[in-house]
């Protein structure tokens, strides 16, 4: 039986494609974006997540940890010293009396997935919604993602794939035969800049986007607008010019940077942006939107 690993299944989502949707968040991503808002999805393996505000410092987690990796979350050391040692066995979670610890990541089979996403079929039908595979990078778990897409199609459910684009071209083409919509991240065109901020050069992603855009599946480009990374006029114009050459692109979504993922990144021991920028102001966001509109692209702010 084909199985995969997810870290969240969000019902009644309105930001991940048309209508009311269920978004399935897959574990594992080939990129390491320094502004990532879903750091639970970066690593493939299950991970311990702590909630320092709930911790009462009782030490129960320390007493039961088989590897000596646990520390009370409330002292600011709940995860950082044990990132490499922790095996996410769950012993500290069962011992914690306040719910200050949890595991991010659980396995799921395709039948279980279909049973979960089918619960809201009536809302999909009334709103023109469906199911979105997101992450992390859903196509990194290729077998599970493709089997899930095929099962959703058999059930008559509209599907979307939210992808960073850094995936095997063959897997991308196989997914295109099974899905109704791609939500494709376009972070920047400049390859050196992309490498510094995400851990990957942009060329493989742009090549995949060009290949995908020649097909029949519609694409919504998603542009995370990050101050100091891609909000300058020169880079925005490069992205807009590139996007204007993609026939399958139906719209562009400008997604302003926010800080909601910062505390989670710290709790997972992941790197942050070198500086903690303020979210882009309205003038900057409108200028980004205008860059894509001048290139003839339907553009909106937000998901």
Image (cartoon, rainbow, N blue to C red):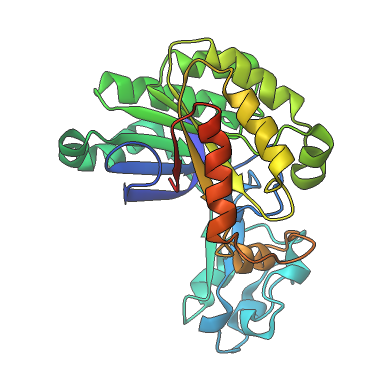
Residue 211: image location, x then y, percent: 60, 13
Q: Residue at x 55, y 89 (%)?
A: 56
Residue farthest to the front, as pictured = 294
Q: Which residue is drawn at 77% across and 70% down?
A: 81
Q: Which residue is drawn at 32% across and 26% down?
A: 152
Residue 195: image location, x then y, percent: 80, 39
Q: Which quarter of the image is occupied by the N terminus?
A: top left
Pick whichever, 38 or 4, lies toward us. 38
Asked if residue 97 is positioned above or below residue 11 in the image, the reply reads: below
Pick whichever, 68 or 144, lies toward us. 144
22 relative to 36 in the view: left or right: left
Asked if residue 303 is positioned above or below residue 281 in the image, the reply reads: above
User: From where the camera sits, is residue 138 visible?
Assistant: no
Asked if residue 171 is positioned above or below residue 100 in the image, the reply reads: above
Q: Which quarter of the image is occupied by the C terminus?
A: top left
Residue 168: image location, x then y, percent: 65, 20
Q: Which residue is drawn at 54% across and 16% down?
A: 213
Pick whichever, 297 or 26, lies toward us. 297
208 relative to 22 in the view: left or right: right
User: From where the camera sits, is residue 278 visible?
Assistant: yes
Asked if residue 101 is positioned above or below residue 270 in the image, the reply reads: below
Residue 295: image location, x then y, percent: 55, 27
Q: Which quadrant of the view contains residue 16?
A: top left
Q: Which quadrant of the view contains residue 128?
A: top left
Q: Which quadrant of the view contains residue 75?
A: bottom right
Count of number-bearing discs: 0
């Amino acid at each position: 039986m084909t199985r995969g690993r997810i870290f969240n299944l969000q019902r009644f989502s309105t930001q991940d494609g048309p209508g009311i949707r269920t978004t399935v968040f897959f574990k594992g991503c080939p990129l390491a974006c320094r502004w990532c808002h879903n750091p639970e999805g970066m690593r493939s393996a299950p991970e311990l997540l702590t909630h320092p505000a709930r911790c009462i410092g009782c030490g129960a987690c320390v007493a039961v940890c088989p590897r000596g990796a646990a520390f009370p979350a409330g002292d600011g050391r709940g995860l950082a010293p044990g990132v490499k040692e922790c095996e996410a066995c769950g012993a500290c979670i069962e011992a914690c009396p306040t719910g200050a610890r949890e595991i991010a990541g659980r396995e799921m089979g395709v039948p279980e997935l279909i049973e979960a996403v089918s619960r809201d079929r009536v809302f999909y039908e009334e709103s023109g919604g469906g199911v979105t595979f997101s992450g992390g990078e859903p196509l990194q778990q290729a077998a599970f993602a493709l089997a899930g897409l095929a099962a959703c199609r058999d059930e008559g459910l509209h599907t979307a794939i939210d992808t960073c684009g850094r995936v095997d071209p063959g897997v991308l083409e196989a997914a295109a035969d099974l899905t109704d919509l791609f939500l494709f991240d376009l972070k920047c065109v400049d390859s050196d800049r992309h490498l510094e901020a995400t851990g990957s050069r942009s060329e493989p992603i742009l090549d995949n986007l060009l290949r995908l855009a020649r097909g029949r599946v519609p694409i919504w480009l998603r542009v995370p607008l990050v101050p100091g990374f891609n909000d300058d006029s020169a880079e925005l114009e490069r992205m807009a010019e590139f996007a204007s050459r993609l026939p399958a692109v139906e719209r562009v979504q400008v997604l302003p940077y926010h800080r909601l993922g910062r505390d989670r990144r710290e709790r997972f021991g992941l790197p942050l942006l070198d500086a903690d920028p303020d979210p882009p102001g309205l003038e900057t966001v409108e200028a980004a939107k205008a860059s894509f509109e001048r290139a003839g692209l339907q553009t909106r702010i937000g998901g």
